[in-house]
Image (cartoon, rainbow, N blue to C red):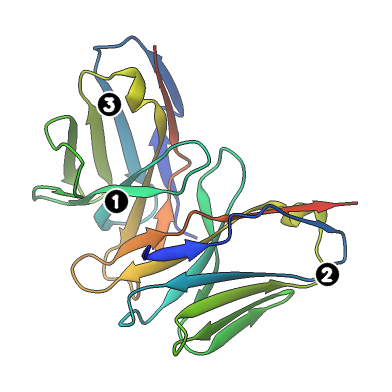
Amino acid sequence: GAVVSQHPSRVICKSGTSVKIECRSLDFQATTMFWYRQFPKQSLMLMATSNEGSKATYEQGVEKDKFLINHASLTLSTLTVTSAHPEDSSFYICSARLAGGLGETQYFGPGTRLLVL
Amino acid sequence: RKEVEQDPGPFNVPEGATVAFNCTYSNSASQSFFWYRQDCRKEPKLLMSVYSSGNEDGRFTAQLNRASQYISLLIRDSKLSDSATYLCVVPVSGGYNKLIFGAGTRLAVHP
């Protein structure tokens, strides 16, 4: 099956710093990638939809200036959490939709666990 | 009403038991549905897709009731390895096919 990787797998940072998370589709091209956030004992919440070569579409309540998304190629999308604060500590998961694929199947990355001190 | 609702559980069952989870959705226009499995501190993995009235894959059976807007997942002959959180997922049609995740149902299978 299609493989999606994320880097880093976990990061601990001080409050106020920025953290960049990479999402790569390893063996397929993805015109659309999705970024989710999951707090403990809660479900995945979609943050934004990232399309190659265009601006990301953010869900209601997600600050676009705080969560910067860049989808520069068909295999790479990045999420930068700017000026991270403890409340941004969460599990961030990306998914990729196969370019030209049928249906809504998304392939998920292994996630990035962010802890902001 | 939440877009996707699930009983959070946990469901504690012995090995070999049959267990069923239900999920209700609010968008009557939804055409396809998914069950994902998520292990602790891991990403979700697709378990089953449901496009018509139901789907069966080995010990797992998913059924769809469009009139009542619910989807069920039945697991027969539970194994210890089935212990996980099961997520009901409904795509939002149009645009880029966003997925709406339910909060998940926890299953714990014990010896």
Dot 2 amino acid type: Asp
Q: Which residue is mark 3?
A: A20
Q: Secondary structure at mark 2?
A: loop
Dot 1 amino acid type: Phe
Give percent across and percent down for residue B95: 18, 68
Determine whether B31 is above or below A3 in the image: below
- Mark 1 to mark 3: distance in Å? 15 Å
- Tell me which corner region of the image, top left, top right, bottom left or bottom right, holds residue B91: bottom left
Q: Is residue B81 left or right of residue B89?
A: right
Q: Chain of mark 3?
A: A
Dot 3 amino acid type: Lys
The crowding category of the residue bearing disc 2, from other C-alpha atoms within 10 Å (few below 14, some 14 to 19, many at least 20), is few
Give percent across and percent down for residue A100: 26, 70
Determine whether A18 is above or below A71 in the image: above
Q: Which residue is mark 2?
A: B77
Q: Is residue A105 visible?
A: no
Please give the name of the residue rendered at 22% of the width and 65% of the height, measured from the top-left corner. B96
The crowding category of the residue bearing disc 3, from other C-alpha atoms within 10 Å (few below 14, some 14 to 19, many at least 20), is some
- Mark 2 to mark 1: distance in Å? 35 Å
Locate the C terminus of chain A by quadrant.
Answer: top left
Give percent across and percent down for residue B103: 49, 54
Label number found at residue A34 = 1
Please determine if labels 2 and 1 lie on a single subunit. no
Give percent across and percent down for residue A74: 22, 51
